[in-house]
Amino acid sequence: MFLEVAATQVLLSTASPRIRFVEFTADHEKENGADWLWWWVDRDGTCYGLLVQAKILKVHGKRWGIDFAYRTRGDDRTQLSKLIGAANRFQVPAAYVLYCADSQYRSTMNCDHPHDGVPCEERDRVGVSTVSALVAETAVGLGRTSAGVMAFHDAVPVEDIASPDHLDAPIVPLARGLDQDLERFLRQPQRGSRRVAKELLRPVQRMRNGQFAGAAVMERASPVTGALFENVPNDYGHFSVPYLAHMLRGLRAEVPGYVRDVLKGRTLPTWVTDHAGGSVVIPDADAPTTASPARAGDGGAGLLIPDEAPQPPPHDHRPGQAA
């Protein structure tokens, strides 16, 4: 397995030009727990953003894990808590991109929850997956030693949300009295950036449904300027932040200026480059495309097989230099 930085470079260089990306010069992971800003942009300008940190699914002996609770020396805060806090700067959800290699690498992992009859560790396309930081937070709280496997179970293949090929199931929230637009979004199939937001929310909502905390009609969370849904319940459940407000604040009606800068190859503002490692933009996220099939036997994770993966191309590290 590559380290996170190298794995990210391989992923992005391989996915280009389908995606656009910019790598910044400064490394602020120690302070913010954050690597990259990811944005899915639809043709009508609707978009969804995440503040993402990359993590490797690792095995030590027979124990599988992801170091969500990692702390830097001299700092009592975990990277997980810093990531959730740092996401407030950009008013987007916090999430992880998980590099999980192929099914052969995961063959000794044991997850008790199958997916449509397929053992969790044998799923296709999960070599590069994404999951909300709220899922990781809950997994760490339930069992630190098994948190990595729990998060992997709820992670969604990036390939699936980038190129959906089937209708998504409805989400039924516990909160009552939702606005009609939000209720419709949760219950009806979505495409593009809306689909990404819904699929990242799904495991969070499933966890919320299993928590012993009331969720009747409640006060509304503080609105985020430009958010597609500004009237969202302030429901915490057992999470550290209001989960619906946190997950949906990244779903915007218009593309932020710094995302346009990435698409146009312009220099990004310092308030962005000083607080993230880079930015990824997936344009035309709602375009009708078909996910490329996984190679036979590799679980869709060929990018992370060290003997076959291409070496990351050199970067000149100039802010605003898009691929």
Image: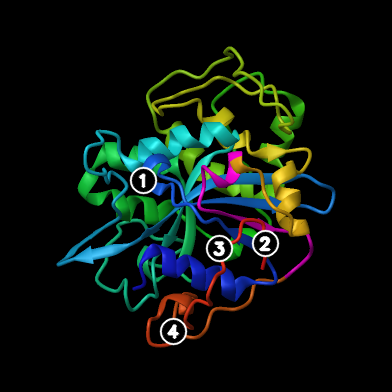
Callout 4, which amino acid? Gly
Earlier residue among tags 2 and 4: 2
180 on left or right of 66: right
Q: Nearer the viewer, mark 2 or mark 3?
A: 3
Q: Vertically, is 128 above or below 136?
A: below
Earlier residue among tags 2 and 1: 1
Q: The C terminus appears in which quarter of the rendering? A: bottom right
Residue 297, labelled with which disc?
4
**Picture coordinates of residue 132 (x, y %)?**
48, 44
Q: Secondary structure at mark 1?
A: helix
Residue 185, quarter of picture: top right
Report the residue marked by disc 2.
166
Callout 1, which amino acid? Lys
Residue appearing at x 59%, y 21% in the figure: 233
Query: Mark 4 packing: few (<14 Cα in 10 Å), some, or many (20+)?
Result: few
Asked if the residue at tag 3 contacts the one at tag 2, i.e. Cβ–Cβ closer than 8 Å, the answer is: no
Q: Vertically, is 113 above or below 218?
A: below
Q: Is residue 125 visible?
A: no
Report the residue marked by disc 3.
317
The span picked out in magenta is 271-289
Query: Mark 2 packing: few (<14 Cα in 10 Å), some, or many (20+)?
Result: few
Q: Nearer the viewer, mark 4 or mark 1?
A: 1
How far, Cα to Cα, is label 2 from label 4?
A: 23 Å
**Picture coordinates of residue 7 (x, y %)?**
44, 69
Residue 30, labelled with which disc?
1
Q: The N terminus appears in which quarter of the rendering? A: bottom left
How far, Cα to Cα, is label 1 from label 3?
A: 19 Å
Q: Nearer the viewer, mark 2 or mark 1?
A: 1
**Picture coordinates of residue 141 (x, y %)?**
28, 36
Q: Secondary structure at mark 2?
A: loop
Query: Mark 1 packing: few (<14 Cα in 10 Å), some, or many (20+)?
Result: some
